[in-house]
């Protein structure tokens, strides 16, 4: 984190192009979400992997590489803009699906920490998913209806 802030002030933190930008951006957000409450459970790690594998049709090797790179990018980031800017241009149905994926990670460990809830709310706002749609998805995931 300190290194990312130092790069920002030195001016050499120009947003580097992210390969497969939206996919890497989503992976970085999911990795961050899994850890936002201070710990990452095995269930959350598996939810991140499985969600990415299912949505992007990745094999295990590809998802492992994606998660490693997403973790690295997340540790370098000073905010979510780098990731959300890659997502805002996607069609609405894809952005809604990203919020669904986030709720899957949140509820993977059968807990919903307020920091997780807040992060999903912030990301939904940043990528243009309505509060109504976010709440519907949250309720579906909480009930296990997805």
Image (cartoon, helix red, strand yellow):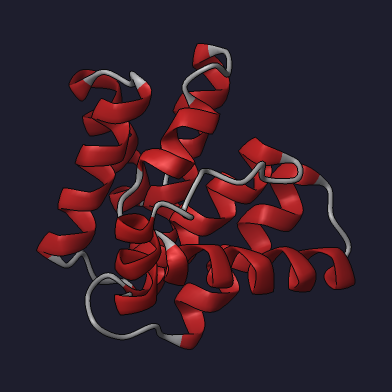
Q: In this picture, is 51 found above or below 110? A: above
* Number of on-image labels: 0
Q: Residue furthest left?
A: 114
Q: In this picture, is 93 found above or below 11? A: above
Residue at position x 11%, y 61% from top? 114
Closer to the camera in the image, 30 or 22: 22
Residue 117 appears anywhere in the view: yes
Residue 139 appears anywhere in the view: no
Q: Residue furthest front?
A: 10
Please tell me in which quadrant of the rendered image residue 68 appears.
Answer: bottom right
Residue at position x 31%, y 38% from top? 123
Image quadrant holding the N terminus, namely bottom left
Residue at position x 66%, y 41% from top? 17
Residue at position x 72%, y 63% from top? 66
Closer to the camera in the image, 17 or 64: 17
Q: Is residue 33 left or right of residue 66?
A: left
Please tell me in which quadrant of the rendered image residue 116 appears.
Answer: bottom left
Please tell me in which quadrant of the rendered image residue 53 appears.
Answer: bottom right
């Amino acid at each position: 984190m300190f290194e990312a802030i130092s790069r920002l002030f030195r001016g050499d933190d120009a947003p580097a192009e992210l390969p497969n930008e939206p996919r890497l951006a989503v992976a970085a957000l999911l990795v961050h979400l899994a850890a936002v409450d201070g710990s990452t459970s095995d269930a959350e790690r598996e939810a991140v992997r499985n969600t990415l594998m299912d949505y992007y049709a990745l094999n295990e090797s590809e998802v492992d590489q994606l998660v490693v790179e997403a973790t690295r990018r997340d540790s370098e980031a000073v905010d979510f803009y780098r990731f959300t800017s890659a997502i805002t241009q996607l069609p609405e149905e894809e952005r809604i699906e990203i919020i669904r994926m986030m709720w899957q990670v949140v509820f993977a460990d059968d807990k919903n920490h307020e920091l997780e809830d807040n992060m999903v709310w912030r990301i939904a706002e940043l990528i243009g998913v309505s509060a109504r749609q976010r709440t519907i998805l949250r309720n579906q995931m909480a009930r296990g209806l997805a």
